[in-house]
Amino acid sequence: MSSIDVIQARVLLDPGDTVVTEDPQYLGAREVFRSLGAELQPVPVDDEGMLTPGVPARLAYVTPSHQFPTGAVLSLRRRLALLAWADSHDAYVIEDDYDSEFRYDGAPLRAIHGLQVSDRVVYLGTFSKVLFPSIRLGYVIVPHALLPAYPGAKWLSDRHSATLEQRALAAFFEGGHFERTVRMSRTRYGERRDALLRGLAQVPGRPFEVSGAATGLHALARVPGLFRGDLERLIGLAADRGVGVYPAEPYYLNPAEAPAALLFGFATIAPDAIREGLALLHEAYRRL
Ligand SMILES: Cc1ncc(COP(=O)(O)O)c(C=O)c1O
């Protein structure tokens, strides 16, 4: 099972239903909702995560522990307000907790699932980030009222997740390897994150404004003073030097409203390579 997939949407939505989504948002979720004929109702994100929706909807999809892609953490008051919104509109909330195993600074907030009084939160997790994406396994905690619908939707979607991988994963847990892997990965990814943050802080001139680096495997860096055309030029100049950097723009429902920002995934790049790449990016930035 993948974390935000057709199963959730099939159980929770009919064509034409409205889904509240964060804007910017995770493309995987957006495309699943669209494929089922849902109407997307984008809600902006600030430093406290997604604003509280102002419209009725059947469902809200959120990434509260590390908003994708801004990295904002949904504040406690917004978590409670989202639950109150869901209660008042008889809506469900999908809480996609896709990468919070990797927390480098501060303490996590309680999951929305743990704060609810009524039973309307679908809590999703995935092994894609904590282990590797091709394992294609995840997990879901389902409200009681929806429980009977899930096995049928899973069967329609892909019959069942691969048994061999599930057994291997169970053995991995039983042997204590999972916790060890998470600990080791957290240290390794923390070093990579630190290299990224240090390198970004050394950008000449106006420093990049980094958000969302306390958790997970990516950070967003706003490039102050740049317009969209400048950002495209920066990306081109970096590419000329063999460095791939990617804009946040595709994640915005209306790309014209996207800030000039770059998304940095650091999990698969060693600290030395991060430093080297950022030095080349700085050089490109100086040429603008
Ligand atoms: C916000 C978000 N949710 C979930 C996932 C993982 O999805 P899956 O479990 O289908 O690999 C990702 C992967 O990039 C993601 O960014």
Image: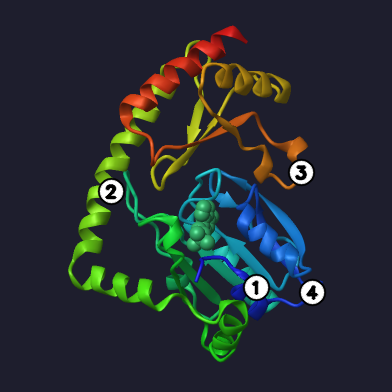
The residue that mark 2 highlights is 185
Disc 1 residue type? Ala
Mark 1 nearby-residue class (10 Å; few <14, some 14–19, many ≥20): many
As drawn, which residue projects farthest toward the right?
16
Dot 4 falls on a residue whose secondary structure is: loop
Q: Earlier in the sequence, mark 3 or mark 2?
A: 2
Give the distance between the C-alpha atoms of the residues marked 3 and 2, in whole angstroms. Answer: 35 Å
- Say what amino acid the circle numbered 3 marks: Asn
Q: Residue 281 at x, y = what percent? A: 50, 18
Residue drawn at the location 34% of the way across and 28% of the way down: 195
Calculate the distance from the C-alpha at mark 4 to the C-alpha at mark 3: 22 Å
Residue sticking out furthest to the top: 287
Q: Image point 53% across, 74% down: which residue?
A: 122
Q: Quadrant of the C terminus?
A: top right
In the picture, the disc for residue 15 is 4
Marks 2 and 1 close (CB-CB < 8 Å): no
Instruction: Measure the C-alpha gap from mark 2 to mark 4.
Output: 41 Å
User: What is the three-letter code of the residue carrying label 2?
Assistant: Ser
- Asked whether the beta carbons under mark 3 and mark 1 sit within 8 Å of each other, the answer is no
